[in-house]
Image: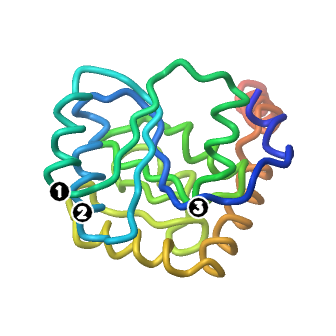
Amino acid sequence: MLEDLSSKDFADESDYMLAVGPLIPLKNVDGMIQAASKVPSARLVVVGDGQEKIRLEEQAETLGVPLNIKGNSHSEEELAQLYSQCKLLIHLSLYEPFGLTPVEAGLFGKPSIVTNHGGPPEIVVDGETGFIVAPRDYSSIARRMKELLSNPELRHEMGRKARKRVLENFTLERSAKRLLAEVQG
């Protein structure tokens, strides 16, 4: 389970932003690439596969964005290593009922850039554990990417707060207790 692996030591932080999810239009990976094209230091690693793969690779090449699509065949340990070594999570889904990936990123002490649609704003506290953006506001997304990529102190402080928030609010044990309290009234 990723929660158990989040305290394991992995290699030092690398220079990429991580996205995790299927390569479908709803996940807005094309929006990530569009925003990243405005950030010279931006590199994207995407764990996922799907119908958009070839189009996204072509878009990234056209816009000059380094993109590495890893596919879906990763063990939890490999996924944990990717979370551990990334600089931040980028999650620009056009709609997401909850959004598990910002929780997973928080477990590894990583800030997230998420959209203001659906559940991710329940997880990410804007300006504290990451940033909340409009999914098609590429200038704002790029500005937030630059801010986190160029400021390690801010990135690490937000990551520390993200981990604290996740451990206090979103672990399986905490969620089960909240659900039980709701059911019992």
User: Which residue is tagged 3?
Assistant: 111
Please tell me which residue is depicted at 81% across the width and 33% down the height of the picture.
Answer: 177
The spot of residue 148 in percent (x, y) is 50, 73
Mark 3: amino acid: Pro
Q: Is label 1 in contact with label 2 (beta carbons under 8 Å)?
A: yes
Instruction: Pick whichever, 159 or 95, lies toward us.
Output: 159
Secondary structure at badge 1 equals helix
Q: Quadrant of the C terminus?
A: top right
Question: In the drawing, what numbered circle is on residue 37?
Answer: 2
Q: Count the labels in the image.
A: 3
Q: Is residue 72 above or below residue 185?
A: above
Give the amino acid type for the residue marked by disc 2 in the picture. Ser
Q: Which residue is mark 1?
A: 63
Marks 3 and 1 sit apart, C-alpha to C-alpha, by: 25 Å
What is the secondary structure assignment of the residue under circle 3? loop
Quarter the N terminus occupies = top right
Q: CA distance from mark 1 to mark 2?
A: 6 Å
